[in-house]
């Protein structure tokens, strides 16, 4: 059995070892450990391997809290102390910035992190009827598999949602559409919890009665989704708590639909918004751009500073939600929303939005390369970039620095998803 010394973790939280010119990626191994491993895929320059045994363990190795860890694909880092997870993610960020962009920020910001358990306020869980495993399964997919993990609890879901997993199994097994219900989406707001059922066939009257009884008993709201996300509608109860989250520091409450994109971790999002606003340092009277603005998570707090904000987003539904929240929070006179596909941004289309003093960019995993390429000589003097992918941040940062003449002022990691390999970060660029 081959033996390797683990040097670091990759962006999927796999241990990295080097052997005879090859890179070995070992599931479950931690930096500093000496391990035995078994390769299951071999290529000329790398191998993928399973951990067989730990010969010399890391002091940061801990016992996973969840009994499903190692099978369920929802978490990959529960065997690593939470603070060590943050340090590992910071190294992933720094390595990406250097190896892809050949960049180092002027300052590394203190990491943003929070409670590592019960944080996940959004989740998409698979549903499948598997008689050999006792009937209905509800959970995340198994690691590197299309199978549904046999989950009976989940430590990263809020406890009241985790407690619903077994009752939901019984409910779904009793429905006439049990084999035509592939997915349930969880959305937790501060006033209530919604479950969106993806149904491939209509419910009968008995199904509807069972759902109503379950919703009333467990104080949740069922939505039904017959086709795409836009078809989701509130089923029961029709009156009742709305879905929203608050940003108390800014005196804001933002409504959302259960299929809208919102940040998974409400507590860390509050800290992230505070950090982003402090770094942006918007002043009264300035004109600020918030690109990929979603439903206004940063847009409305920026407007509270007294600046005028233009939020740009590709989804008309999210833009409409943002406009409604701006009006409800008394900010309609300081906020303007526009619908635009920023992946097709050009110098002309960006210039048509007007001149901006500062800019916040919060793109999806694909990054914002077309936006940064489109920046002209009169571009904003400061850019705050919130990233969910260190690789595309590094690529875009290289253009901002080498082509557009910005200085790379600061960067830091945000542990929005504890126990996963997901690395969120924030970076600041200033005109030289």
Image (cartoon, rainbow, N blue to C red):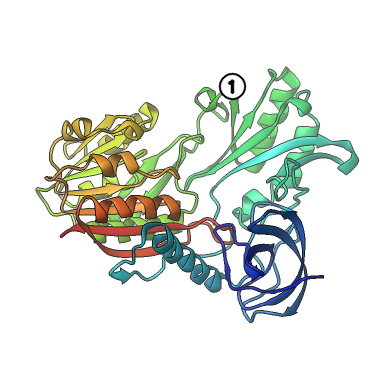
Q: Secondary structure at mark 1?
A: loop
- Foreground pick, 105 / 274: 105
- Foreground pick, 80 / 124: 80
Q: Quadrant of the N terminus?
A: bottom right
Q: Is residue 326 above or below residue 45?
A: above
Question: Residue pushed farthest right?
Answer: 132
Q: Position of residue 301 (x, y in %)?
A: 27, 50
Residue at image coords 63%, 51%: 160
Q: Position of residue 267 (x, y in %)?
A: 45, 58
Q: Is residue 225 above or below residue 217?
A: above
- Foreground pick, 77 / 123: 77
Q: Is residue 79 shown to the viewer in this render?
A: yes
Q: Is 268 positioned to the left or the right of 235 in the image? A: left
Q: Quadrant of the C terminus?
A: bottom left
Q: Is 187 positioned to the left or the right of 395 in the image? A: right
Q: Position of residue 349 (x, y in %)?
A: 22, 30
Q: Which residue is mark 1?
A: 227
Residue at image coords 45%, 45%: 365
Q: Is 47 positioned to the left or the right of 237 in the image? A: right
């Amino acid at each position: 059995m081959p033996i390797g010394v683990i040097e670091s973790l990759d962006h999927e939280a796999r241990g990295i070892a080097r052997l005879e010119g090859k890179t070995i990626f070992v599931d479950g191994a931690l930096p500093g450990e000496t391990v035995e491993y078994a390769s299951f895929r071999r290529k000329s320059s790398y191998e993928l391997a399973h951990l067989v045994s730990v010969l010399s363990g890391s002091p940061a190795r801990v016992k996973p809290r969840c009994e499903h860890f190692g099978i369920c694909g929802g978490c990959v880092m529960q065997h690593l102390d939470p603070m060590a997870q943050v340090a590992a993610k910071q190294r992933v960020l720094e390595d990406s910035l250097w190896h892809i962009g050949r960049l180092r920020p002027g300052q590394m910001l203190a990491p943003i992190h929070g409670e590592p358990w019960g944080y996940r306020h959004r989740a998409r869980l698979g549903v499948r009827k598997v008689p050999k495993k006792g009937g209905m399964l509800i959970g995340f997919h198994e690691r590197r598999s299309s199978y549904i993990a046999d989950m009976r609890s989940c430590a990263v879901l809020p406890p009241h949602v985790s407690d619903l997993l077994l009752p939901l199994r019984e409910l779904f097994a009793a429905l006439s559409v049990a084999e035509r219900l592939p997915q349930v989406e969880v959305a937790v707001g501060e006033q209530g919890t919604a479950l969106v059922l993806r149904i491939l066939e209509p419910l009968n009257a008995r199904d509807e009665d069972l759902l109503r009884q379950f919703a009333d008993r467990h104080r949740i709201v069922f939505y039904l989704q017959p086709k795409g996300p836009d078809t989701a509608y509130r089923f029961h109860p029709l009156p009742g708590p709305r879905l929203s989250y608050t940003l108390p520091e800014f005196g804001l409450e933002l409504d959302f639909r259960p299929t809208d994109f919102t940040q998974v971790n409400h507590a860390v999002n509050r800290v992230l918004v505070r950090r982003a606003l402090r770094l942006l340092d918007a002043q009264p009277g300035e004109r600020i751009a918030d690109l990929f603005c979603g439903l206004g998570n940063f847009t409305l707090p920026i407007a509270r500073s007294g600046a005028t904000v233009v939020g740009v987003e590709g989804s008309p539904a999210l833009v409409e939600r943002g406009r409604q929240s701006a009006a409800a929070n008394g900010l309609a006179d300081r906020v303007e929303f526009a619908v635009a596909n920023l992946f097709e941004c050009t110098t002309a289309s960006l210039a048509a939005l007007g001149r901006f003093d500062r800019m916040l960019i919060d793109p999806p995993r694909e990054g914002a390369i077309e936006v940064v390429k489109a920046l002209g000589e009169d571009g904003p003097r400061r850019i705050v970039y919130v990233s969910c992918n260190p690789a595309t941040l590094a690529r875009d940062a290289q253009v901002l620095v080498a082509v557009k003449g910005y200085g790379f002022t600061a960067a830091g990691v945000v542990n929005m998803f504890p126990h996963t390999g997901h690395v969120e970060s924030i970076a600041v660029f200033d005109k030289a």
